[in-house]
């Protein structure tokens, strides 16, 4: 089940960075949703390599094709098959990797697990696998928006030590898209871009934090115990390449507060039960409470750097390896649509689960 | 599936804080494992309320009973039913909660989701639910130890701003158990205990960080893409009551490093592929690389405090509520066996998954 | 996952014929359903050994206890834990089985699979395991009745060559319960009872067919492709002890008809799309069409007979074994509530799945 | 999960009879299996329309393409994406079906469930969906053969009242393929072919029985309780289009025997525990016992006939409909590879499950 995500709204991704392409099967999509490629392509364009000077220059148009599951522009309720062809396959660029394990990549662990590996560009461990997630996430976002009135977005909150100031309650998608680093704080965005450019020029890379937000989630989504909403979000985020951490609401900072400081008092407001503060991050006991859900995802710096590094060969001999060719100085701008996609996938799954058990 | 965890080694927990008891069914346990209640009880004792002056004083012996799945002291391969009776049920202590939602508890969200709730002591949202997890985790730890040579442990790394110094490679279980706060750094432990006592006396509570460790995990456990080992760990940890964050290896701190600083170089050592550093936290591309797995879990301060707080009633009126009775100033000492249990459950599940697909 | 059934309305059973008891955890039950032990006990009484002179005389009161999941007589939406103690444990009656495999029982295959077995009365392979299913099935039947207006029942259609005449559209539960063999055709019932008594007196056993019926299932339940309604019913029925076959609607007999004879013509009736005949058995393309669902389950004769039979010992030597003690001449009367239970479990699961994806 | 089958060796199929094609994602395939399109195409050719004069004449080359999951001719352990383009799409042939429900097809139930349908050739309910299963089944058969020494095959046992005489222990694949009806009894095959030709000429259709066989399955595969081997086989078979029944070993006929007649005595033979008879059909208590597994699947006559039939329109008015164009007089010859595929999928899944829990 390693390649399937979700319980009722299920996606199964397939494909390697080199080969016939990458794709996804979406199972459990509600019927009669208006859906064409035009609903999906914009998020793929946001995920696409080569979209700006601060991301990896691999040249892929990443054009999505709906192979099944729709009829006359509407979903049938049957599996939606989506396919994106690989175009910029350059196996020759990876020839040295055929025999050496790239440090902090998955080359060694795949080899240890399976006894063989597709060394061309990372194979299944390539970030290219996220094409399927982002495509499915676009469908999930559409369902959330049209059927439940829920809005999902994400943005770059921090690049190394450059921290943006953003209000999760108010930030708009247009602000996120207003610059190439996808940070809605224009001043911070400028510093972030210059930092990433320095890294690119130095053949190095840099990490940071993406913040995810879901607004207008109604009270009641999420399950007690194991499938708490924050647990499923945590899994979703830690399944993204290069992610190293997740926290929600007050998060790691909340560990520094006292109970009397941390609790979110309830008050009636507009006929609804609301909280005066939102340290809970919109979730209590694993279930949404109607407040804005917000969380952070830490990403390490991309492992491929243009410097010689110590490593080991498949023949188990010490050696060195220097990154070549396409260099991605910062994964964060492209991680933004990935975080949105995974958030939407978790939420639509829980929306359907809630409806199944509790109706409404 | 909210109450089931795992794919091949599956546990299903049941029970509320008040009622016939709490329990767990373990499905998929390998046969012929020596197993009696004596293998399980010690971890339940570590999770038990009333074990020391710095945790909740609820009086429960938490005596486990094996109802099925063993024969003549060995596992049969069929489901293991475990049951712990509730003893210290005092519904009268909760009468005010029958009509008011406790701030930052699950009272409101359960009511919003299900339209009713067991207001006696938190019902299913009570930390009492973790009895089943800890019991099942003891079985998982035994399998890991006896069948795979893997060691799992956890300890309190931080209480509010008091941070312990611990080496994940060397810390021993006996050091963890040498004091009531379960912090293997004796000096820090003393400060932590005094801090928690101050909180208890002030009717307040405090949070912190538990660090989890798994040693001697062989290379190859974990799955690409969605069921990455760190993703399943993240979900496991965020499913624990009061947890707010998870990070692994370099974690959130790794976001501050450059790629050239962060990468773990490979070197041959003792005939094995090893890394010189371990910022990856023992997992690369979702799969274990043979190094020690270590991660942190942030816990918020316990929500029940002995102070009057603003809240709302079931009749949707503003009101106030003051915590009464049993007061838990810090969940961390009892969270340690919970973190160990969830870690072991994730690992044994992945051990079996790896064996299923790849043999060996 | 061998001991869990269902996708949204999930049951997990545990327990062996000898040991602390048998039980079930029901996960995913809708909240606010009125539920007490009195809703469950009647079906357990129908499944109970010793209920009449034509079934096994094991003495069990099979008293069910709700351990969790309800509050003030209503379901909470959280897991319902049900437990039935074992009473009539007589391991000494099974001492010869400790070393010999009973023919056509699961003794040998469990031993081959797990390397050990609980030889006391069949262990997990005992029909006693169905206690949990029947208890959960009673809850499922209540949901179907109260929330969806669906009625489920079953009856003995055939014992060896004695075939009853029953109209699935009209048969009532009271008719089924009007005699000890649970056959609503009184004349056939008399012949069946006499046949079973002859078998009992001869120390032999006899099989037959149970027919299951679900009425007023609305159109639209069931899933295309793998989880067709009839596929899930087939799995449910073949998971019952001693079952050897399943067919639905025209079934095996339908293989003898031509297409022009077999097709069910559609006609409007009372404003609804109806079929003039019902060879489809209420399901087309895996999805209910609004007609009555009916199907048959074949049961072999019980394997325990009071005659000496050739067999093999655990030491892999040829030997003989003669059944002793409690003798069940016919499983069919007790299989009736089992078939009802499994039918209800399949249907309520699909009802929730349909609501999740398609609403309404 | 309607479109996913299996627990550890999982397939997800997608695609409709008209649209971009049909395909399957295989997840959980063991690594290092030699695999190219040439391993899969032969079974697709056996499933293909137009392969002989007694099956539907739709013209499809059904050429399979491996899009992912292999590298240099061996499986990677990552998802195998398989795709078959649709070629002979003739939506115009179905124009009348755009507004009328074909009797005993899934037209009405899909419409009732989803509120819309792809009326072109049956959409997802088309037998074309089985392309993905048969392709995946070819991979499963290869694993069973190469890794476990297990042989799977199926054949036509009966067409209407023409019954073949076949020994499940000895029948060879070459005999099955020696005639176009796939019946290894040459004399019966001749009569079957003539019967089907008469049906074709009369614009009518005919059903029958396919028998499935698995030889050399080791003792120990299968799970107690819900995922019994015969339960999973029953589900697999009843998920095939047009199937109406399943029985195993003695099956429905076993219901006519007495216990003393039905039991399979154990005897040692060649150092192994064997049974003298095989009424159990190779499975006892849900677990394989080392004997040959054999079972039967009943198929109704194909619903499309070239005669005018009563039906109802989407506007809920009585009307009539006459089948036109491509006419399939008998699904049985093409059902043979489908039965083999589903059998192999069940067995390889259980082989991996057994290895996971019990090792070896």
Image (cartoon, coloured by chain):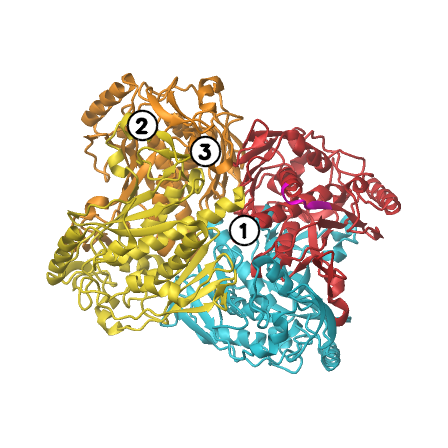
Chain colours: A orange, B yellow, C cyan, D red
Q: Nearer the viewer, mark 1 or mark 2?
A: 1
Labels 1 and 3 positioned on one and the same chain? no
Where residue A38 appears, as percent x and y from the top left, is 44, 28
The label on residue D359 is: 1
**Number of numbered discs visible in the structure rendering:** 3
Where residue A242 appears, as percent x and y from the top left, is 35, 33
Labels 1 and 2 positioned on one and the same chain? no
Cβ atoms at labels 2 and 3 below 8 Å apart: no
Cβ atoms at labels 1 and 2 below 8 Å apart: no
Rendering quarter of residue D151: top right
- For the residue pair C78 and D114, the one nearer the viewer reads as C78
Rendering quarter of residue D148: top right
When the figure is inspected, residue D112 is found, relative to residue B47, above or below; the finding is above
- Judging from the image, mark 1 belongs to the subunit labelled D
User: How far separated are the C-alphas under marks 1 and 3?
Assistant: 34 Å
Residue ID for mark 3? A132
Would residue C237 appear left or right of A263 to someone viewing this image?
right
Which residue sits at x=79%, y=42%?
A: D176
For the question of whether residue B65 can be seen, the reply is yes
Residue ID for mark 2? A333
Report the span colored magenta. D147-153
SS class, disc 1? loop
Which residue sits at x=42%, y=46%?
A: A349
User: How far separated are the C-alphas under marks 1 and 2?
Assistant: 45 Å
Where residue B290 appears, as percent x and y from the top left, is 39, 40
Indicate yes or no whether the magenta region holds residue C51: no
């Amino acid at each position: 089940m390693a390649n399937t995500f979700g319980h009722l709204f299920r996606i199964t991704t397939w494909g390697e960075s080199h080969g016939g392409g990458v794709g996804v099967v979406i199972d459990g999509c509600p019927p009669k949703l208006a859906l064409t490629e035009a609903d999906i392509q914009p998020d793929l364009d946001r995920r696409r390599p080569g979209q700006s000077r601060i991301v990896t220059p691999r040249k892929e148009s990443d054009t999505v094709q709906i192979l099944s599951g729709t009829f006359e522009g509407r979903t049938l309720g049957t599996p939606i098959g989506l396919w994106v062809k690989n175009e910029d396959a350059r196996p020759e660029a990876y020839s040295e990797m055929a025999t050496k394990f790239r440090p902090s990549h998955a080359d060694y662990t795949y080899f240890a697990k399976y006894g063989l590996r597709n060394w061309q560009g990372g194979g299944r461990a390539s970030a290219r696998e996220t094409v399927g997630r982002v495509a499915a996430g676009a469908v999930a976002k559409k369902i959330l928006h049209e059927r439940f009135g829920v809005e999902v977005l994400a943005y770059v909150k921090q690049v190394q030590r450059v921290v943006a100031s953003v209000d999760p309650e108010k930030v708009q998608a247009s602000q996120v898209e207003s610059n190439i680093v996808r940070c809605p704080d224009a001043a911070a965005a400028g510093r972030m871009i210059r930092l990433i450019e320095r890294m690119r020029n130095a053949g190095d890379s840099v990490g940071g934090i993406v913040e995810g937000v879901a607004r207008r989630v109604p009270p009641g989504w999420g399950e007690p115990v194991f499938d708490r909403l924050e647990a499923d979000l945590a899994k979703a985020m830690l399944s993204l390449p290069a992610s190293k951490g997740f926290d929600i609401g007050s998060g790691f900072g909340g560990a520094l507060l006292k109970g009397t400081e941390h609790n979110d008092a309830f008050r009636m407001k507009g006929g609804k039960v609301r909280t005066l503060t939102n340290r809970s991050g919109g979730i209590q006991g694993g279930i949404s409470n109607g407040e804005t859900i917000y969380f952070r995802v830490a990403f390490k710096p991309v492992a491929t750097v243009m410097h010689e590094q110590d490593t080991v060969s498949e023949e188990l001999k010490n050696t060195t390896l220097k990154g070549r060719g396409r260099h991605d100085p910062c994964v964060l701008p492209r991680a933004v649509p990935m975080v949105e996609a995974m958030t939407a996938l978790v939420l639509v799954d829980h929306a359907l689960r809630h409806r199944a058990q509790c109706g409404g």
